[in-house]
Amino acid sequence: MSSTAIPLHRWQFFRAGGFDQVKLETGADLMHLDQLDQKLWVALACPTTGLEFDTKTLALVDTDKDGRIRAPDIIAAARWLTSLLKDPNDAVKGSATLPLSAINVSVPEGGQLLASVKQILVHLGKPDAQGITVEDAADTARVFAQTKLNGDGIVPAEAASDPATKQAIEEMIACLGAEMDRSGKPGLSQPMLDRFFAEAKAYSDWWSAAETNAGILPLGERTSAAAAAIDAVKAKVEDYFTRCRLVAFDPRAVGALNREEKEYLVFTARDLTLASVEIAAFPLARVEAQKPLPLKEGINPAWAAAMETLRTAATEPLLGSKTSLTEFDWAGLAGKLVAYRNWLLLKPASPVETLGLKRLRALLSGPAQQQITALIAEDWKLEPEFASIVAVDKLVRYHRDLYKLCNNFVAFRDFYSRLDKAIFQAGTLYLDQRSCDLCLIVDDSGKHALMASLAGTYLAYCDCTRKGTGEKMQILAAFTGGDSDNLMVGRNGVFYDRKGRDWDATITKIVDNPISIRQAFWSPYKKVARLIQEQVAKRAAAADAASVSRMERAAAKAGETSVSGTPPADPPKPKIDPGLIAALSVGAAGVGGMIGGILSSFLGLKAWMPLGVVAIILVISGPSMILAWLKLRRRNLGPILDANGWAVNAKARINVPFGASLTRVAALPKGAKRDLADPFADKKNPWPAIIVTVVVLGVALWILNDWGLMHKWTGVGKDRSTNSVPALNTNAPVTTTTVSTNK
């Protein structure tokens, strides 16, 4: 048993972002994407929205129309594209024009596509063109507009050859709505046609039941008017007869049921109309025991018109001429319309009713259904030809865009090469003398930040607006260079999208992370400086408050003196506490001893003092720098994209050198001249320089003395040859002191 092994494609990789990425350079690379282990793909899925990429191409790649592109979609698109090109290497050129000679006619689909391309060019007035552009292929509506049938199973009214069929299609579209065919015209499909005639037949059959049963429509076409007249007064009539029954039960209720006189006084002072709600709320007629309901005289004025309609539209046609109705008459009147009301409950709900019964029966009995069905079938026969025209648009777009999509999905070449922006980069944010290239469009900054904060990157979310058009959007900008001293919520900048349009950008949310090692080096000193400034500000504020309080007390005492004429007694002078003085002396001595010990230890380093300075700096800045270094090593693009709907398959690092290319800090151009004289510069205080100079000179003199150079040059100071300091006067007599003791 023999088997033929499928030859494996030889892949090439490049390293960027701390991981290996496949190098896509030839058509063969695209052809064999199915052989590339998906563990080596940089992304496994991405959304079809929020990307700087042709949306129609993304929609074509997304074959299942779920709004996401996955690895199988990319593989299928690459395989289809390369199979229709004579030279698969044409697929990596990214050209917007597809030469006709590049189409592979050796496969059946290729031949059909070439014929469709030529048909499109003829319709566009370019029969001699040697290539088709994306713009040409996208203008399929213009091609379809010149054809009555275009293979989509939807026929517009213009597709009918006779006026009667055309009218029928127009009427059906008016009833049920339209479906748009490929030409952009409203049309009718087979399911819509079947629905129309099914609903028309149901409506006709419903009417047939009434036509064959005289009890359903006792007044013919006037039956509905009679039912409406009865319904208009039904509640009020039943209220009247109920009141009459109550009076018959207890005559004492007659006054209350007819409304008392005082109830009229409520609205008699106002201008009244028959439409007044108060009048309509009164009984339909005066209530008495066993009294029939009058139809003409003694009717509540607010209901007189409705009762007249009841008399003329229902009572007289159904019961004959009457001037009043008993409760029995009323029940009989309603009973004559029971069959009609039951019939109405069976009425099919359908918009076809608007055409009227006569027109619907004409359509049902005529040839319209068969003619339109035949027209739709004829349209479907052209489906392969016109589907091929649609495929031309797909082929030309893939020819232009698919290679770029692969280099932003299978690999992140565009992002890491910095030759072009990646498809997820929305533009550039200018803020705080920096330009940030890693900007993404986000839908919800709060939700996005939950995941993106794991990226270890300093992120600023901004609201962007264009006041001229009222457009709004949210973006995320990654700051990977400079420092964060002047980045805060509320700062404004300008965002330029990929189309070059400018937006007003305002920071609304910040995810704080280290930006650089340099920032971490100075961070402890800046924190100490801020702490000192805050403490000084607090002390100054407290001193100011105390000063104001003393002035207020002094003013109050002066006021008391002016009123009483007696100056207030001076406060007792504070006594000096010897114990406090002693404690302060001991404390000062301790602090002085500590400072002296530190200086002695530092000066004892002698020639190693510069290293001591470096050691002190490392002790202060080292922990901050180490922490920043560890966080910068973890800086990762993956969580930022994952929060936007991507499925990033690799740890796409943003190290310090690469981060510096994503965020550019302001710098003077080469060859620029700068005038350093600032007329508004702060006046320099000479004392800091004097103090530093004195300290440096003191340390230098101490070092020179310790090395013996001062003694060598001046004869004064420490002599390293004897390791002693010579006396100033060696010829002075020695004085001996004798101490006597008396026993």
Image: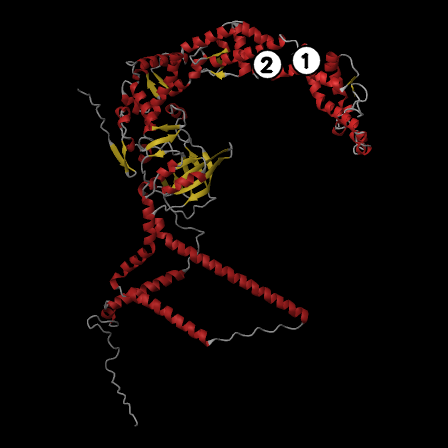
Q: Is residue 621 above or below residue 191?
A: below
Q: How is the image coloured?
A: secondary structure
Q: Is residue 137 above or below residue 592?
A: above
C-alpha distance separating marks 2 and 1: 20 Å
Q: Nearer the viewer, residue 50 or 91?
A: 50
Residue located at (44% from left, 40% from top): 461
Mark 2 nearby-residue class (10 Å; few <14, some 14–19, many ≥20): few
Q: Is residue 555 above or below residue 81?
A: below
Which callout, 2 or 1, points to the residue nearer the camera? Answer: 1
Expressed as whole percent of the image width and height from the top left, the position of residue 405 reads: 34, 28
**Horizontal side, residue 249 vs residue 69: left or right:** right
Q: Earlier in the sequence, mark 2 or mark 1?
A: 1
Name the residue tied to disc 2. 354
The amino acid beneath tag 2 is Thr
Do labels 2 and 1 touch, CB within 8 Å? Answer: no
Helix, strand or loop at mark 1: helix
**Horizontal side, residue 272 vs residue 575: left or right:** right
Expressed as whole percent of the image width and height from the top left, the position of residue 518 reads: 34, 49
Name the residue tied to disc 1. 223
The amino acid beneath tag 1 is Thr
Residue located at (41% from left, 48% from top): 485
Helix, strand or loop at mark 2: helix
Q: Is residue 271 above or below residue 576?
A: above
Expressed as whole percent of the image width and height from the top left, the position of residue 49 reads: 42, 30
